Amino acid sequence: IFFYLAVYDHYRVLRVVPRATFSSMNIDFCAQALLAPACGILLVAIIFKGNCMAGSYCLDAAPLLSTCFFAFLAHCAIHIFLLSCLVPLFGLREKGYRKDAKKYSEVAASEPCSWFSANPIHCLRSKFVFNHSPPCSYFMAGLESKMEVNESIGCFFKENAAVVEDARSYYMPKWRDVNTFLRKSTGLLSEADESTMGDTGATQSG
């Protein structure tokens, strides 16, 4: 099951999720906190391998196990404490939200691709399980005009109707206009030929 979840999540992130936005430090804090057990295991390995080495301590099995266990717990506690209290002291002093921050409804009204519309499973669940009316529209590039609004489920995007050109507003030439144009063009060509011939004759006589 774990292998299936890992493969599915890997495929979903690379093939389905168009982009990811990390708008806070919560993700970074969780990632740093998850390193606490890993670093604690390294400390336990050092204590275990250093037992009974030349010029080092030498503990029996039960005391060595207790020492490794409490060292692991102490390291995790100190690790989390430093992340929570010491690390923020070196961060930005400014607190609060940005003054130009927008609400989700405002951003979703202008961005067709969201967590809801980019998730095909959520769109299917919205239509066949929850029976939303209208259901959450699945985002596909080029088909934004087909997306429907349902503010109760977080779908705010609606593409404005595009301005369609009316071909009837353009002047369409008729056959009479074409005939007149051809006659004028023929007349201009005849005059140009006559003038050329006249200039040639004058040059030859000279």
Image (cartoon, rainbow, N blue to C red):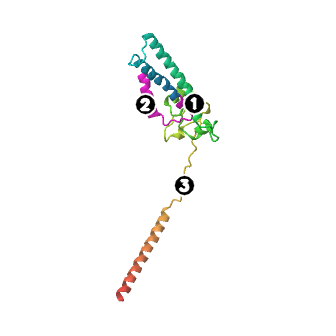
Residue 143 shows which numbered tag? none
Residue identifier under label 1: 86
- Identify the residue at image location x=50%, y=24%: 36
User: In the picture, residue 150 is in which quadrant?
Assistant: top right
Q: CA distance from mark 3 to mark 1?
A: 72 Å
Please rate how many residues cluster around mark 3, counting C-alpha atoms within 10 Å: few if below 14, some from 14 to 19, many from 20.
Answer: few
Give the label, 2 or 3, closer to the camera. Answer: 2
Q: Could you say whether the residue bearing mark 2 is in a helix, strand or loop? A: helix
- Identify the residue at image location x=56%, y=33%: 25
Residue identifier under label 2: 11
Q: Is 201 on the left-hand or right-hand side of 169? A: left
120 relative to 142, above or below: above
Number of numbered callouts drawn: 3
At label 3, the amino acid type is Arg
- Report the front residue among 76 and 156: 76
* Farthest residue, direction bottom: 206
* Farthest residue, direction front: 55
Residue 57 seen in the current view: yes
Label 1 or label 2, whichever comes before in sequence order: 2
At label 2, the amino acid type is Tyr
Give the label, 1 or 2, closer to the camera. Answer: 1
Residue 132 seen in the current view: no
Where's residue 135, x and y in %?
Answer: 56, 31
User: In the picture, residue 202 is in which quadrant?
Assistant: bottom left
Contact check, label 3 and label 1, Cβ < 8 Å: no
Label 2 or label 3, whichever comes before in sequence order: 2
What residue span does the magenta drawing correspond to?
Answer: 1-29
Where's residue 49, x and y in %?
Answer: 40, 19
Magenta region, mostly helix, strand or loop?
helix
Q: CA distance from mark 1 to mark 2?
A: 37 Å
At label 1, the amino acid type is Leu
Residue 168 shows which numbered tag? 3
